[in-house]
Image (cartoon, grey):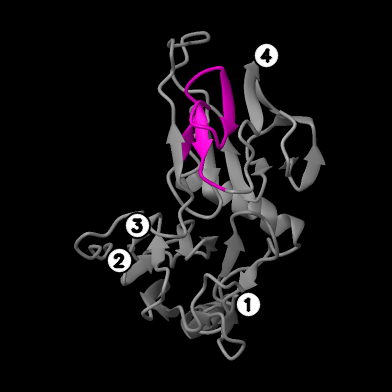
């Protein structure tokens, strides 16, 4: 095994079992991903000189690395790979003593926009709030791709109506769906009588406390919660979260296969 793709929203890791893999919706692909937004043959992964390279195969909804649209790009350990609306942490160990390859420049006009990105609008706070000098209260990171939603003050109403502090453009979202409330140095979420409910870590609830890495469902939209001052885009945080998932799956002991030279050295030492 040469690495894994760990779903950002939770779920079993996908092992990368060969040096060249086609990823797509077709069952004949080396890595089948059975979601309608993923193209039949979406992209190709190639393990080259100890690092993974990804190439888009003309997919309908695009391929992104760390939220940047690309036709071809190097995948470094703990990067986030987005295939349409499906996001994965890229988990593998870089070869020791070998510097990572330089990133490939994205195509002209490359952006994070696209049909798979959750679109949200944010109302400007009517009165600036700061608790204990804080200017940031954390973020909600869309699991399907898109820019993080800043939690810029201590109480926010989330819903489909224009008057909400965070407006989510989804037909399953109620006009005033839920409320996020900062108290006692932490966030809580409370349902406001929504039609399709809220869930935290896949448990339906009326009210719940949010912790670092919690997955918040607002109707059918999923968001990962990042604590104040800690961006989940930080690679170390990605690695810690992903390694936690690997431990839960019993896969945290994986190591890259030894090269012939390493095996020879190990034989000499024994």
- Mark 2 neighbour class, 10 Å CA radius: few under 14, some 14 to 19, many 20 or more: some
Q: Which of pointers 3 and 4 lies earlier in the amino acid sequence? A: 3
The residue positioned 45% from the left and 54% from the top of the image is 117
Direction from residue 258 to residue 113 in the image, left or right: left
Q: CA distance from mark 3 to mark 4?
A: 36 Å
Instruction: For the C terminus, give its image quadrant.
Output: bottom right
Q: CA distance from mark 1 to mark 3?
A: 47 Å
Does 45 sit above or below residue 149?
below
Q: Which mark is residue 184?
A: 4
Q: Which mark is residue 43?
A: none
Does 71 sit above or below residue 152?
below
Q: CA distance from mark 1 to mark 2?
A: 34 Å
Does 74 sit above or below residue 163?
below
Direction from residue 200 to residue 144 in the image, left or right: left
**Between 201 and 194, which is closer to the camera in this rendering?**
194
Q: Which mark is residue 101?
A: 2
The residue positioned 60% from the left and 72% from the top of the image is 35
**Between 184 and 191, which is closer to the camera in this rendering?**
191
- Look at the image and give the residue range highlighted in magenta: 148-170
Of tags 4 and 2, the one toward the viewer is 4
Q: Which residue is mark 1?
A: 270
Of tags 1 and 3, the one toward the viewer is 3
Instruction: For the N terminus, give its image quadrant.
Output: bottom right
Q: Which of pointers 4 and 1 lies earlier in the amino acid sequence? A: 4
Q: Which residue is mark 3?
A: 68
Cβ–Cβ under 8 Å for marks 1 and 2: no
Residue 154: which quarter of the image?
top right
Q: Which of pointers 4 and 2 lies earlier in the amino acid sequence? A: 2
**Between 198 and 107, which is closer to the camera in this rendering?**
198
Of tags 4 and 1, the one toward the viewer is 4
Q: Is disc 1 placed on a helix, strand or loop?
A: loop
Q: CA distance from mark 4 to mark 1?
A: 57 Å
């Amino acid at each position: 095994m040469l690495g894994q793709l760990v779903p950002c929203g939770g779920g079993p890791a996908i092992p990368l079992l060969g040096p060249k893999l086609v990823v797509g919706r077709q069952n004949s692909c080396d890595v089948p991903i059975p979601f309608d937004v993923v193209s039949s043959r979406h992209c190709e992964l190639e393990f080259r000189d100890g690092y993974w390279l990804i190439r888009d195969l003309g997919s309908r909804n695009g391929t992104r690395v760390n939220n940047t649209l690309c036709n071809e790009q190097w995948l470094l350990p703990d990067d986030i790979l987005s295939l349409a609306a499906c996001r994965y942490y890229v988990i593998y160990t870089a070869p020791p003593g070998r510097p990572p390859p330089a990133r490939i420049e994205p195509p002209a006009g490359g952006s994070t926009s696209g049909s798979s990105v959750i679109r949200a609008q944010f109302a400007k706070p009517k009165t600036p709030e700061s608790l204990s000098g804080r200017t940031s209260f954390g973020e909600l990171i869309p699991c399907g791709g898109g820019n993080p939603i800043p939690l810029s003050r201590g109480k926010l109403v989330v819903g489909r109506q224009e008057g909400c502090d965070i407006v989510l453009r989804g037909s399953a979202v109620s006009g005033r769906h839920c409320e996020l409330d900062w108290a006692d140095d932490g966030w809580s979420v409370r349902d406001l009588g929504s039609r399709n409910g809220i869930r935290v870590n896949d448990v339906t609830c009326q009210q719940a406390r949010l912790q670092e890495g919690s997955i918040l469902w607002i109707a059918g939209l999923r968001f990962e919660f990042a604590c104040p001052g800690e961006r989940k885009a930080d690679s170390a945080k990605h690695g810690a979260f992903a390694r936690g998932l690997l431990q839960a799956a019993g896969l945290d002991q994986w190591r890259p296969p030894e090269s012939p030279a390493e095996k020879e050295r190990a034989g000499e030492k024994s």
